[in-house]
């Protein structure tokens, strides 16, 4: 092998090492799923965030963080996820995990920042540091309300007793008749279905029922609602 060929090989090798070095990177994403009420039907919505994205959602919000490391053959990658309230900054992270992929649930209102840091190491090579742009997630403050009555008569108007809420992290509700017997109960797992006015498959009688609803918001607000609920199957829109 002559000197020229040796020089070319050395140059190509240097270029290859340089390219390999710059290839040590990541393409992190954050994914989550929320449920929205569309035309009175609970409808799931899947979201995926990239670095630099800014989203506003309700609590509780379970986020899944993926590092998505590129092909790092021969390199060791050490990942660190930092999640912090933006008013406190990165120096006081709420979450600091050394995992490639991780999951966390945001339950408190506020503005949050998330970053991924990766250190790529290889014997006889300088470490390569990666820092993602900030993911921004804003968790809303809480709201909770419910109607005073409904008319489950199948006319497509006010047929369902529905609780309207935002960023509620805990909830338990029960509706009883005038004798204190439970006719319906709900929590966060089934509140979006609403109550159709039935008990054991049969419509309850028209009359006054009583609701006791307790909940906790993402902002720490405690709700304790006690109120009468009117069930009026015989009511029609034109009756008013």
Image (cartoon, grey):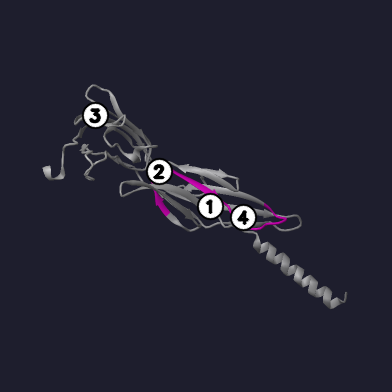
* Residue placed under numbered mark 1 in the picture: 115
Q: What element carries label 4?
A: loop
Q: Where is residue 198 in the image (x, y as percent from the top left)?
A: 28, 33
Placement of 28 over or under 8, stated as above or below: above
Front position among marks 3 and 4 = 3
Q: Which mark is residue 69?
A: 4
Report if residue 69 lies within the magenta region: yes
* Residue placed under numbered mark 2 in the picture: 59
* Residue placed under numbered mark 3 in the picture: 210
- Spatial CA distance of label 2 from label 3 is 28 Å
Q: Is mark 1 on a helix, strand or loop?
A: strand
Front position among marks 2 and 1 = 2
**Between 3 and 182, which is closer to the camera in this rendering?**
182
Residue at figure coordinates x 37%, y 43% from the top left: 167
Category of crowding for the residue at label 1, using alpha-carbon neighbours closer than 10 angstroms: few (below 14), some (14–19), many (at least 20): many
**In contact (CB < 8 Å): disc 3 and disc 4:** no
Which residues are the magenta region? 55-76
**Between 94 and 184, which is closer to the camera in this rendering?**
184
Q: Is 25 left, or right, of 148 in this rendering? A: right
């Amino acid at each position: 092998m002559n000197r020229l060929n040796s020089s070319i090989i050395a140059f190509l090798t240097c270029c290859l090492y340089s390219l390999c070095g710059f290839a040590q990177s990541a393409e992190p994403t954050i994914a989550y799923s929320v449920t929205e009420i569309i035309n009175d039907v609970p409808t799931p919505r899947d979201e995926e965030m990239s670095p630099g994205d800014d989203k506003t959602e309700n609590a509780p919000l379970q986020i899944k963080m993926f590092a998505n490391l590129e092909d790092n053959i021969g390199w060791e990658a050490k990942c660190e996820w930092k999640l912090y309230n933006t008013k406190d900054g990165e120096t006081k992270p709420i979450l600091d995990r050394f995992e490639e992929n991780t999951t966390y649930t945001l339950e408190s209102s506020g503005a949050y920042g998330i970053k991924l840091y990766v250190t790529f190491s290889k014997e006889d090579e300088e470490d390569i540091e990666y820092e993602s742009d900030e993911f921004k997630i804003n968790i809303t403050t809480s709201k909770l309300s419910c109607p005073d009555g409904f008319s489950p008569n199948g006319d497509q108007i006010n047929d369902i007793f529905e609780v309207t809420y935002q960023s509620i992290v805990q909830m338990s509700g029960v509706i009883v008749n005038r004798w204190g017997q439970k006719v319906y109960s709900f929590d966060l797992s089934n509140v979006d279905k609403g109550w159709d006015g039935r008990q054991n498959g049969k419509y309850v009688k028209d009359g006054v029922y009583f609701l006791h609803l307790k909940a906790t918001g993402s902002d720490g607000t405690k709700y304790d609602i006690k109120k009468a609920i009117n069930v009026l199957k015989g009511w029609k829109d034109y009756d008013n």
